Image (tube, rainbow, N blue to C red):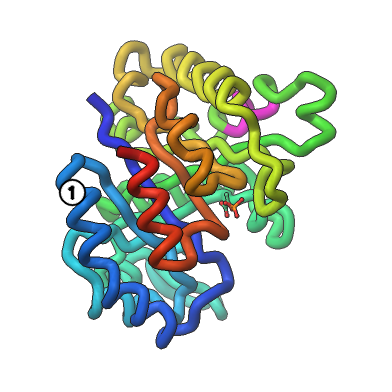
Amino acid sequence: MRTKFLLGNWKMNKGPKEAEEFASLSAPLVDLAAAHHLEVGVAPTFVSLASVASHKPTQLILSAQNCNEHDHGAYTGEISISMLKEIGVTHCIIGHSERREYNGETSEACNLKIKALLANSLTPVYCCGESLETFEKGETLSFVSEQIKKGFASLTPEEAVKVVVAYEPIWAIGTGKSASSEIAEATIKGIRDVLKELYGSRAEEIRILYGGSVKPNNIAEYMKCPDIDGALVGGASLTIESYRELVEGMI
Ligand code: PEP
């Protein structure tokens, strides 16, 4: 049984004060989620992680949006996993399409970060997803399979089951144009088949989220799909009201 997971990706929104306000108001929705065996979390920008950490209820998962795979040293502007861990971060988004696009992150680079996170007992949330052009050419599965194989390269089954995958078609992120639940389920099932090739029946343990214009009014559709284990949500995770409605839609 895979526990459903809702993760809010705040991107470059909410400085420490606004983030603190959200964290301080989040107890009722976290309790509601816990009562229904849902995991819920937020991924604030680096400078807001500490303020969320000190004002959040215990069960609200705290995720970073990126990390560096090295433990320390001459990497100006970077943040290590041990630093994140020190302030209470337990999860980290890796390979978001915006980082792939604007920061040149490759699946090979993501693989190094995933391994470093696992070595530090943090949970990687590994993003994959195709462009509109790839989708229209009907090449989604081969493209995403490649991202999965490279991202999971040389992980043992014991490590692989600790990774959360997020399938996020690029054409659906922040566009209001979500993938239909049929498309999301078919691709996510395809991703699970790739993971089965790699890890056999243990692939059933790996959680795969959908992301891309998930809103309170469509989240329930995705949650009905057997292979979709939750959602990675940007815009609709930014206010307490909307976040609460997302949780309600998952119940
Ligand atoms: C995201 O940032 O990962 C995302 C899916 O954004 P949105 O929900 O706004 O499309």
Depth order, front residue of 150/202: 202
Image quadrant holding the C terminus, namely top left
Quarter of the image holding residue 234?
Answer: bottom right
Identify which residue is drawn at 55% across, 27% down.
149
Q: Secondary structure at mark 1?
A: helix
Amino acid type at circle 1 is: Ala
Residue 180, position as x, y percentages in the image = 62, 28
Give the main secondary structure of the magenta stretch: helix
List the residue tagged with mark 1.
34
Report the number of discs. Answer: 1
- Dot 1 crowding, Cα within 10 Å, few <14, some 14–19, many 20+: some
Q: What are the residue bounds of the magenta stretch? A: 143-147
Residue 214, position as x, y percentages in the image = 54, 45
Report if residue 69 is visible in the image: no
User: In the image, 55: left or right of 125?
Assistant: left
Residue situated furthest bottom in the rendering: 17
Depth order, front residue of 251/212: 251
Identify which residue is drawn at 65% across, 39% down.
178
Residue 78, position as x, y percentages in the image = 52, 73
